[in-house]
Amino acid sequence: MPNLDRLIERWCAGDEKAAEALYNLHKTRVYRLSFGLLGNIEDAEEAAQDALTYALLHIHDFDPRRSKFTTWLHMITVSRCRDLFRKKRLPTLSFSAWFNRDHAPAPSDLNPEQHTVRSEKRDMVWEAVQELSPSLREAIVLRHWGEHTYREIADIAGCPLRTAQSRVRLAYRHLEKLLTGVGQRQLAEEAI
């Protein structure tokens, strides 16, 4: 795996191969984050492309003293997703569609019945996630699919640390209410 800091230095110096390497290194994660927030393949591709293009064109704006590169890139990605979401008021997506795109491969030791039960649980949780307000959905997707810390979520969402923590906690509470009678928190945590 290439050294990220070195790639950034090389791109800042004009090395186009470094820009291509940065793009290839981050395109999958940026796409997955976009898809998790937007729930639509075409819009996720557009947001991911816009975010990566913007980041590469504005690489001189990145300050490693303020954040990690991935945090800065994901902040740009969330901004692009918010813009698209506001423009289109996107439809929801089933949880199975999310996981059928290789986001969480099923363990090979599950029998078909167990696999079906697990898929149904994921569907229920994803439908509940889609019912969350945009800020809560964003927080839970960043936390669990983006694997960001609360500090990184705060930076990406442009809110205080305690607000980021609160949004994730509130998202869990809302998911528990929405999933009452289906295993509640255990179900939500298993599927997420």
Image (cartoon, rainbow, N blue to C red):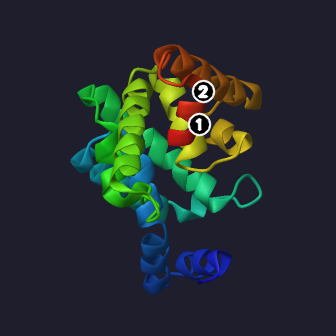
Question: In the rendered image, is residue 60 in sight?
Answer: yes
The picture places residue 155, in percent across and down from the top left corner, at: 66, 40
The picture places residue 17, in percent across and down from the top left corner, at: 44, 86
Instruction: Give residue 189's quadrant in the image.
Output: top right
Q: Amino acid at mark 2?
A: Arg
**Vertical comparison of 159 with 19: above or below:** above
Between 76 and 121, the one nearer to me in the picture = 121
**Vertical comparison of 119 with 139: above or below:** below
Q: Amino acid at mark 1?
A: Glu
Res. 189 mark? 1
Residue drawn at x 34%, y 45% is 116
Residue drawn at x 61%, y 50% is 147
Between 72 and 187, the one nearer to me in the picture = 187
The picture places residue 94, in percent across and down from the top left corner, at: 29, 36
Res. 185 mark? 2
Q: Are marks 2 and 1 in contact (CB under 8 Å)?
A: yes
- Left or right: where does residue 91 sit relative to residue 11? left
